[in-house]
Amino acid sequence: MNKTVFISSTYDDLKEYRAVWELLEKFDVNVRGMEQFGARKEAPLATCLAEVEQSDIYLGVIAFRLGSIDSQSGKSFTQIEYERAYELNKEIRTYLVDEQNARFAIQHIDRDDKRTKLEAFKALLRERHTIESFTSVDDLKEKLGRDLKRLLTQKQVEESNADEYIASKHVIDRFLLTPKQFSGREVRVCVQFKGKPFPASKKLCAAFNLEFGETIGRTIEIVKPEGFKNSGLDELYSSSRHAETIINPPNLSQLDLYAKLQFADKEVASVSARYKSQTYFDPPDPDPQSRYEITYSADAKVILLSSKLSEVT
């Protein structure tokens, strides 16, 4: 028996994004959403919840708008639909807009109280689920397609890994030409590690909106797709949540993964954090008259704070 997918999102701001319906036609699946409700005597919210209850998979697509509000609870229809799916233990996949890189018209961005409620809802989703972010219709389709392959039976033959690398090569080539346009896009790469993990510097974290003290980097070389040696994409970074992946990868020399392309319009001189100031002499000559001192200031400080004595004497 085919599974049923319910698509939950606001409408006016995400009309073009709901084109993912075309993607779902590739799968043996029944699709439910507001486009198919038609004229019914039930109130809109009751109709939505009935569809959620009859579905196997909930797909939530959320951008910058809260959408229709239920007068009794004060919650958005989208949140109430999600909560019913969560309560019934449905298969849930949620996709949040990449707030740094996606482009939306200003009339499709909520402010004030609605924005506060929307941010609280997004925080709840991030707490409960592994969230995917999207920057464009194509980006959302790509990620949805990959997730649905794991959940559903495809009508068509799956794309080979080679095809996925070819698509990634095209995106990376364009990114290196117009990085601002393609920043936030996700690509599949196979990387080879060239050095040990290091803490990301404060300046790098500031440039890419990462958490300083929770971000780890590692020098790499892109093996697949080919052609990106010395391209500038020679470091891989990960937050504390996923840091173990690059600290202790399953394969000690190479790692096959999906990664986001990121762009900052500023130079970052040092990518590795310093927790201790260091002084060097240049040139390293013993003659005091021919050398001068260079000091590198620390980004932060690390200490040991005593907590208790061990029981070992």
Image (spheres, rainbow, N blue to C red):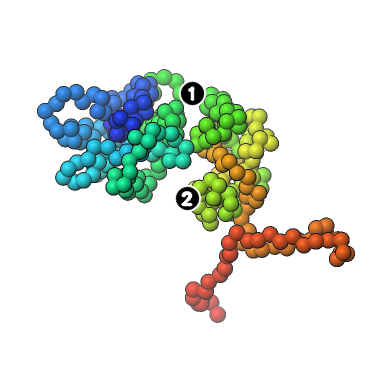
* Total numbered labels placed on residues in the image: 2
The label shown at residue 159 is: 1
Viewed as shown, does residue 25 lie left or right of 221? left
Label 1 to label 2: alpha-carbon separation = 30 Å
Secondary-structure class at tag 2: loop
In the rendered image, which quarter is residue 170 located in? Answer: top right
With 246 as the anchor, is 148 left or right in this view? left
Q: Mark 2 points at which residue?
A: 241
Please tell me whether residue 127 is drawn above or below residue 68 in the rendered image: below
Q: At x 57% / y 68%, what residue is drawn?
A: 303
Residue name at image x 34 percent, y 47 percent: 119
Residue neighbourhood size for the residue with mark 2, other residues' Cα within 10 Å, grouped as few (<14), some (14–19), many (≥20): few
- Residue 44, image x and y in percent? 18, 32
- Label 2 is placed on what type of residue? Arg
Q: Which amino acid does label 1 sit on?
A: Glu
Whether residue 150 is visible to the viewer of this picture, yes or no, is no
The quadrant in which the C terminus is found is bottom right
Q: Residue furthest left?
A: 41
